[in-house]
Image: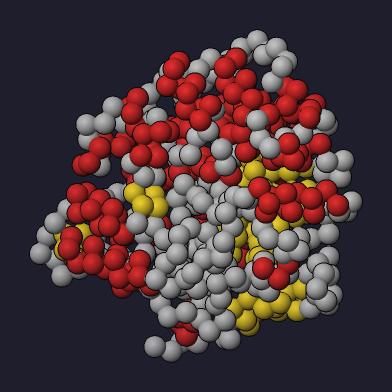
Amino acid sequence: MRSAFTRRLILARGVPSLKDRLALTARSVATLPPRMAPASMAATAAQPAPQEDPVSVAPAMPMGEEFWRKVPVWKDIPAEDFLNYAWGIKHTVQGEGKLAHFLEQVLPDQVPMDGVAGINNNPGMQTRDELVADVLDGIKTATMSTRMTPYILSRIDWSNPRNDPVFRQFIPVKSRMLPDHPKLTLDSLDEHADSPVSGLVHRYTDKALFLPTSVCPTYCMFCTRSYAVGGDTDSVKKASMKPTKRRWEEALAYVESQPGLHDIVVSGGDAFYLQPEQLAYIGKRLVEMPNIRRFRFASKGLAVAPARFLDNKDIWFQALTFVAKKAREAGKAMALHTHFNHPNEISWVSEQAARRLFDAGIMVRNQTVLMRGVNDDTATMSTLIRRLADNNIFPYYVYQCDMVEKVEHLRTPLQTILDLEAQIRGSIAGFMMPQFVVDLPGGGGKRLACSHLSYDRTTGVSRFMAPAVTGRDKANKVYEYYDPVDSVVNANGRD
């Protein structure tokens, strides 16, 4: 929730000026308990606000197609509402009850089954009620709770949802799920074992992952952190990662105590769900640590709620630029890492949001997860990479889907990612070519997919080593990634 000061300011003044917003960020941090408010940041509140500049105030948007009006429940929603972040929060679809009600309102009487174009009375069709029941059964099986922003829901083709690449990522359908490979786990990367304190994963020598929150604007079915992110489900009791002062301070104190740490990823959950004053506080703390040279905030917000970056009634973007400015003044690097998986997630709204980040001098990198039936063909992945590059979003990683439970239907064999890299490399400038990687099960970290020691298509087992990752007796350890069971069966020519 917003701080009381934030609420009073917005209610009293409507859209705050840049001066008000900057004062708000500084004042909010200054009023944190003494241990959580560095003196240098508190002093910012007393400094005169800089002159307003065009980067800090979102320009009036040249409107594109009002694509959300194609969704029956939003056919009468004007742009000023749909593109307002507070409206989006209010109308986020969360939980099985709200999702079922939404589906009943937007689905046609019949929808095509997977891989079927379908027309009325075609046996390849499923009724609305059948699909809703299929989804509710999927929710009972899935490890992730459901939560979707109006924006990402508006990017789905509701006349053919089962075959839509956005729908496939976020809405579980029981009839599509496959039995888990026996090696799948909730915490496939073994993050818990590499956490010296709660919410801080220290695997690499010079880099650590800080998890201040476990909440996201939209929950991904394939989340690698399904052991903690989101609400409890029928199948998973989530580990607690609430944003408490004590937990944050323990994590930040650990970072400060490690002279070999130079690079911090602030993720979760999603940094989009840090309040502006919390974002500013964490960023300022990291800037002031002598050992930290680089840090990034990880957020899917640009892909699932991009209008927030353009909304002058919300100050999250101003908090981000505040931290970026402090980092530059200290000669350090701050970046935003985001998460687009398919070209259909990109609209004129996300393009304008990306342009605003670019104009503010904020580096944006993207991390994509490779998924079956979503982006596992050359044409789709190439288009995504190029669309990102054209919007000054650097395609950073394409991940092999992690070996987490209940996503066997989304995983691909290693051969798929090897083929994609081979086919795409050379089609775009090298500095815009992502690294195609496997985040090794068991905590070996990220390795290029093509760097495997061996890959047996018959058994579906690929083997890797990670020479630079040596903690917890990992020196000379061999890590194994397992192809999905059905792909191994198909490779061996059996039914």
Is 127 above or below relative to 148?
A: below
Name the image quarter holding residue 135: bottom left
Q: Residue at x 36, y 34 (%)?
A: 87
Quarter of the figure that contains the C terminus: bottom left
Q: Nearer the viewer, residue 83 or 467?
A: 83
Q: Residue at x 86, y 52 (%)?
A: 257
Q: In this view, which residue lies farthest toward the right?
A: 259
Q: In this view, which residue lies farthest toward the bottom?
A: 494
Q: In this view, which residue lies farthest toward the left?
A: 121
Q: Residue at x 69, y 43 (%)?
A: 296
Does residue 238 show up?
yes
**In the displayed structure, does residue 102 sit left or right of residue 253?**
left
Colour convention: secondary structure
Residue 102 % position (x, y): 25, 50
Q: In this view, which residue lies farthest toward the front?
A: 33
Residue 212 % position (x, y): 63, 50
Name the image quarter holding residue 479: bottom right
**In the displayed structure, does residue 158 sit left or right of residue 13?**
left
Q: Residue at x 67, y 68 (%)?
A: 192
Q: Nearer the viewer, residue 284 or 172?
A: 284
Residue 29 % position (x, y): 66, 31
Residue 405 % position (x, y): 50, 73
Q: How many marks?
A: 0
Q: Nearer the viewer, residue 226 or 173?
A: 226
